[in-house]
Image: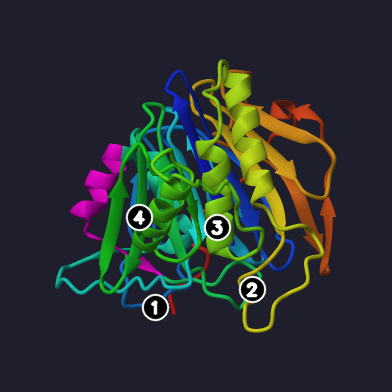
Amino acid sequence: MCTRVFNNRNQSYLTTARNMDWKTQLPTSLYVFKSGVINYALDGTESKEYNNWYWTAKYSSIVAMVGNDELGYGASDGINSEGLVANMLYDKNADYQLNEPKNYKHLNVLRWAQYVLDNFKTAKEVRDAFIKSDIELVEINVPGSDSPAALHLSASDRHGDNTIIEVYEGSYHIHYNKKYNVMTNEPNFDTQLKLNDYWLWQWSEENDFPSHTIPGGPFAADRFERATYYYHHLEAPNSQQESLAQAKSVVANASVPLGMKGFVGHPNIAPTIWTVVSDHLQLKYYFCNARTPNIVWIDMNEKLPKAKISKVDVVVESNGTFTSLNFVGCINNHLQPTENPFVIKTATV
């Protein structure tokens, strides 16, 4: 229920845009973590068979966080101070239990993106770490939902490289390539690449009767091909601003409008509730709420609070009612010191 596009058609200007689609609104905040923050792998509500552990963040980061104190938290998306971007996308086929016998460290899947942003500066580092990983992910429900957080992860960096990690059939399935610029929820990425080969041939000069039509539906495969079509028909951007605009407009074309009726038997079709756009080079992180007219952003190069962790709420929930806060432009000055959401929440049960 998400679409992600990494615009590296010109290696001098690098941008990632990502749609967040969900069946209901979600409490959402933008967090700033400074390097040196200690984050825990588990929140304490998981099975007592797991031993908690922690790491110290090597890099600062900006993160789109879903949830709140009552519902729990999940890092959905973000960028770190080295220009690495991590995106979490829904993956109904995700199965986190690994086959290889090993004494694994366990990691709450809602903290996976934060772990990546805190510890790595390139997509290659992410790939290498999970090829030999001793981490097994733990399934947790999406905050405020009875739906499991079945997820896969993408990471893109300021060198134009991409890593996509899926977990199924007892192992990590890792794809690393500058050409892996578009992804959606499903099917698995191997199958997406096969679909892509067909469409790229359809649009190529090798085809004597090229077809430049594209699928218009809301299903993940439709949206993958639609985003791929527009991405491969783009001119190379001539500025970072142009790169940002291109990436944002491509994912907008692959979004699902608010109020979209559901399809019987296809609960994964859900509206796009917000979009984030990450500037890998200038370290700006843009948030575009589908329910507000304005785009807001946090700029790592501008003044930030002295606190180790700060946040600004952009969608708040109270007694089941959601309110979208309507800021304008750079919102660094709206950040307020806050507590770490990635600590132990309750005693282990």
Q: What residue type is labelled 1?
A: Ser
Q: What stretch is highlighted in magenta?
A: 124-138
Q: In which quarter of the image is residue 208?
A: top left
Residue tagged 4: 165
Residue 262: % across, % down: 73, 75
Q: Name the mark nearer the viewer: 4 or 2.
A: 4
Q: Quadrant of the C terminus?
A: bottom left
Q: Which circle's residue, 2 or 3, is located before the other in the chain?
A: 3
Q: In this view, does 196 lie above or below 63?
A: below
Please give left or right for residue 264 compared with residue 4 in the image.
right
Question: Between marks 2 and 3, how big is the CA–CA gap?
Answer: 12 Å
In primary-sequence order, the first of circles 1 and 4 is 1
Residue bearing mark 3: 74
Looking at the picture, tell me which residue is in the foreground, 195 or 47.
195
Marks 3 and 2: in contact by CB < 8 Å? no
Q: Earlier in the sequence, mark 4 or mark 3?
A: 3
Q: Which of marks 1 and 4 is in front?
A: 4
User: Would you say the residues marked 4 and 3 are in contact, meaning their CB atoms lie under 8 Å apart?
Assistant: no
The front one of 343 and 149 is: 149
User: Dividing the picture into quarters, in which one does residue 97 lie?
Assistant: bottom left
Q: How far apart are marks 1 and 4 (CA)?
A: 25 Å
* Disc marking residue 47: 1
| Residue lying furthest front | 208
| Residue shown at 41% from the left, 55% from the top | 198
Identify the residue position indicated by label 2 in the image: 145
Pick whichever of labels 3 and 1 is earlier in the sequence: 1
- In whole angstroms, how far apart are the C-alphas of marks 4 and 3? 18 Å
Of callouts 4 and 2, which one flags the residue occurring earlier in the amino acid sequence? Answer: 2
Task: Specify whether residue 75 is in view.
Answer: no
| Amino acid type assigned to the residue bearing label 4 in the image | Ile
